[in-house]
Amino acid sequence: MGSELLGRVIDLHGRVLDGGLPLQGLQRASLYRAPPRASQLQRAGQLYPTGIKAIALFSPFTHGGRAAVFGGAGVGKTIILTEFIRNAVEHLRGVAVFAGIGERSREGLELWEEMKRREVLGQTAMVFGHGAARCDPPSCTGEA
């Protein structure tokens, strides 16, 4: 945990996947710790402004909710994710944490490159589960 993760790509064990220097002095916390108290959370049900009209109309996000993007090859998953993250970082002045669970390394590499191109990687931490964990983005072959 911490601001040192911004702009970095790691696996779910905290190992660096972006070819950069190892992370030093990060605060670590167990996945199995007690959840935050309800008083520490934002009120559920408030709409989260994504800046993407189609999502706001057909499937609005709410604070405290979860969102996922599913689809076949070439339908625009990476573009939707990048726009959502860009809007959160630029317009809401926030940071983003992307968790790619089960992502293939090619898709993770594509998202990583698109986030660099749109200059939002510096306000984003990317964490990948299995598959991408065996591949450093600068040298990915596309095979997981």
Image (spheres, helix red, strand yellow):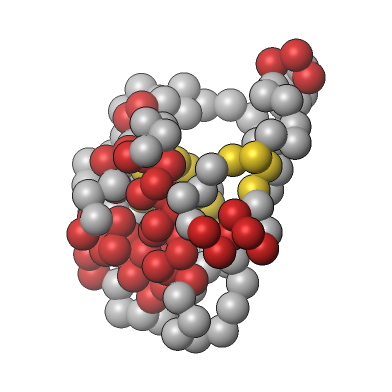
- Residue 52, position in %: x, y? 48, 57
Q: Is residue 83 left or right of residue 139?
A: right
Count all numbered tags in the image, as a single digit.
0
**Residue 62 visible in the current orientation:** yes
- Please report the residue visible at 69 percent of the width from the left and 34 percent of the height from the top: 46
- Please report the residue visible at 75 percent of the width from the left and 36 percent of the height from the top: 45
| Quarter of the figure with residue 141 | bottom left
- Please report the residue visible at 37 percent of the width from the left and 38 percent of the height from the top: 91
Q: Is residue 114 left or right of residue 2?
A: left
- Residue 12, position in %: x, y? 52, 48
- Please report the residue visible at 22 percent of the width from the left and 64 percent of the height from the top: 138
Q: Is residue 100 above or below residue 22?
A: below
Q: Is residue 37 left or right of residue 110?
A: right
Q: Quadrant of the C terminus?
A: bottom left
Q: Is residue 121 above or below residue 41?
A: below
Q: Is residue 105 above or below residue 94?
A: below
Observer-nearest of 104 and 69: 69
- Residue 139, position in %: x, y? 24, 69
